[in-house]
């Protein structure tokens, strides 16, 4: 058996959170990493109306999801993975008819990986309002026989978590060993710990913030305006016109993608490199970074739904558990009972480490069990999706602990 030591800066529970300790975490690396291989998406249908934060409700909806691993006899080893803005239920593995479609967190989840499917039963779900199989603006409204389009309600993180709880009921899972997510997915984990404290043993809150800063809301608004002002948007009912507001969605993605990378990462990847090796004195793509952003925008606009993008960015803007408590995050987090792993990345300027520390402070005020790690990584916000050895070993070590608690 090989044992690997991981040295990382971790803030341990203390009243002031000022003193960093060096801790040595060991993990067993005897098991080899391998892909999950072919996975199959599933759907669960729900007829009972789901009350939404906006005051409306939705009935007869479906949630697309995937599962990996085996649920143990006691049903105690389930882990819910919550997705971020443009992801889906396809968290790991590949599809038989599209082997190039690899799950968005495949480096994290699978046999022998940090979230080991030899130990845990992992669930990924496409959120309500999505465009990857769950009921959303693209879906047919049973009352009209037409796509929901602009009439699909605005949904929030709370609504997603309530829908996920119904999926857990459908699967016979009373309590999750852990809920896990990065960015917007981590916000869902925070919400789970507050709304359903008895149903969560651990929460892994990665690259998160307790709410969006004004700058983040501003970026989202620029992206939405690009879509809303696209001539092909038609007030959100573009399906009936046989078009997609791809120009707006392309710009929205380009704006978003800039915020996912750090300045250093963008500089090291692209710098001021010219595609043709010389200036063209035109408005075509001359710099490699321009070409990259246009490529990302074109690709995204070909598969993502604009109405879904509008709703997901609004859900990001609205998330603020402290709002109903006069801005006191500690009061908002008081119902939480689970253990927490909170992880941030030094170059993530969209959800900076300072914002993660706000979460940690709030948990410590409530005397909750929390481990905080700040990973020195150059990649910016996207670091939570990448295979950084220190980050992955930390997550693996935490799941060793979870596994020890829930058993086989």
Image: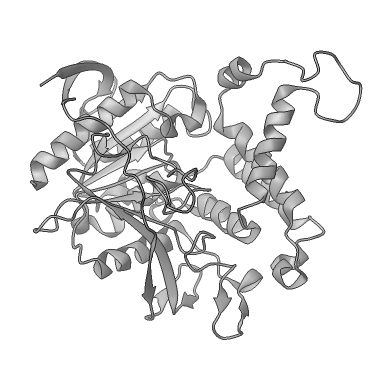
- Residue drawn at (19%, 17%) of the image: 4
For this view, does 325 lie left or right of residue 154?
left
Residue 341 at x, y = what percent? 27, 36
- Residue drawn at (47%, 76%) of the image: 58
> On the image, which quarter does residue 72 sit in?
bottom left
Q: Outermost residue, right direction? A: 281
Residue 20 at x, y = what percent? 27, 17
Could you tell me how many numbered marks the image carries? 0
Q: Outermost residue, front direction? A: 97
> On the image, which quarter does residue 158 sit in?
bottom left
In depth, the one of 276 and 400 nearer the eye is 276
Looking at the picture, does residue 47 appear above or below residue 366? below
Residue 252 at x, y = what percent? 68, 45
Q: Is residue 19 visible?
A: no
Q: Outermost residue, bottom direction? A: 143
Looking at the picture, does residue 347 appear above or below residue 52? above
In depth, the one of 249 and 97 nearer the eye is 97
The colour scheme of the drawn protein is one colour
> On the image, which quarter does residue 113 sit in?
top left
Looking at the picture, does residue 141 appear above or below residue 119? below
Residue 303 at x, y = what percent? 61, 53
For this view, does 394 lie left or right of residue 329?
left
- Residue drawn at (30%, 48%) of the image: 333
Q: Is residue 215 visible?
A: yes
Q: Locate the N terminus and report the quarter of the image it occupies.
A: top left
For this view, does 384 lie left or right of residue 294?
left
- Residue drawn at (30%, 59%) of the image: 195
């Amino acid at each position: 058996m090989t044992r690997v030591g991981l040295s990382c800066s971790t803030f341990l529970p203390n009243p002031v959170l000022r003193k960093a300790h060096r801790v040595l975490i060991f993990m067993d690396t005897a098991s080899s990493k391998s892909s999950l291989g072919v996975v199959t998406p599933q759907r669960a249908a729900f007829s009972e109306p789901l009350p939404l934060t906006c005051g409306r409700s939705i009935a007869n909806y479906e949630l697309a999801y995937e599962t990996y691993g085996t649920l143990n006899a006691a049903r105690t080893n389930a882990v819910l993975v919550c997705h971020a803005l443009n992801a889906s239920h396809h968290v790991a593995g590949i599809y038989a008819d599209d082997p190039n479609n690899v799950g968005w967190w495949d480096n994290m989840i699978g046999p022998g990986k940090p979230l080991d499917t030899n130990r845990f039963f992992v669930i990924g779900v496409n959120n309500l309002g999505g465009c990857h199989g769950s009921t959303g603006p693209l879906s047919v409204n049973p009352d009209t026989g037409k796509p929901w389009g602009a009439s699909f309600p605005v949904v929030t993180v709370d609504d997603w978590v309530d829908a996920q709880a119904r999926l857990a009921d459908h699967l016979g899972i009373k309590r999750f060993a852990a809920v896990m997510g990065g960015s917007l997915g981590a916000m869902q984990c925070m919400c789970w710990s507050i709304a359903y404290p008895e149903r969560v043993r651990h929460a892994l809150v990665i690259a998160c913030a307790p709410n969006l800063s004004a700058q983040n809301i501003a970026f989202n608004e620029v992206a939405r305006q690009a879509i809303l002002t696209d001539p092909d948007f038609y007030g959100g009912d573009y399906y009936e016109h046989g078009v997609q507001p791809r120009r707006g969605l392309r710009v929205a993605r380009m704006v978003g993608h800039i915020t996912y990378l750090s300045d250093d990462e963008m500089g090291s990847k692209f710098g001021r490199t010219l595609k043709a090796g010389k200036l063209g004195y035109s408005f075509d793509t001359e710099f490699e970074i321009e070409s990259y952003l246009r490529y990302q925008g074109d690709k995204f606009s070909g598969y993502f739904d604009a109405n879904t993008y509008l709703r997901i960015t609004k859900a990001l803007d609205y998330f603020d558990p402290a709002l109903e408590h006069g801005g006191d995050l500690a009061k908002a987090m008081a119902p939480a009972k689970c253990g927490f792993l909170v992880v941030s990345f030094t170059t993530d300027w969209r959800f900076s480490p300072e914002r993660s520390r706000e979460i940690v402070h709030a948990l410590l005020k409530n005397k909750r069990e929390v481990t905080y790690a700040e990973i020195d990584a150059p990649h910016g916000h996207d670091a939570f999706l990448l295979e950084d050895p220190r980050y992955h070993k930390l997550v693996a070590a935490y799941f060793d602990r979870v596994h020890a608690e829930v058993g086989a």
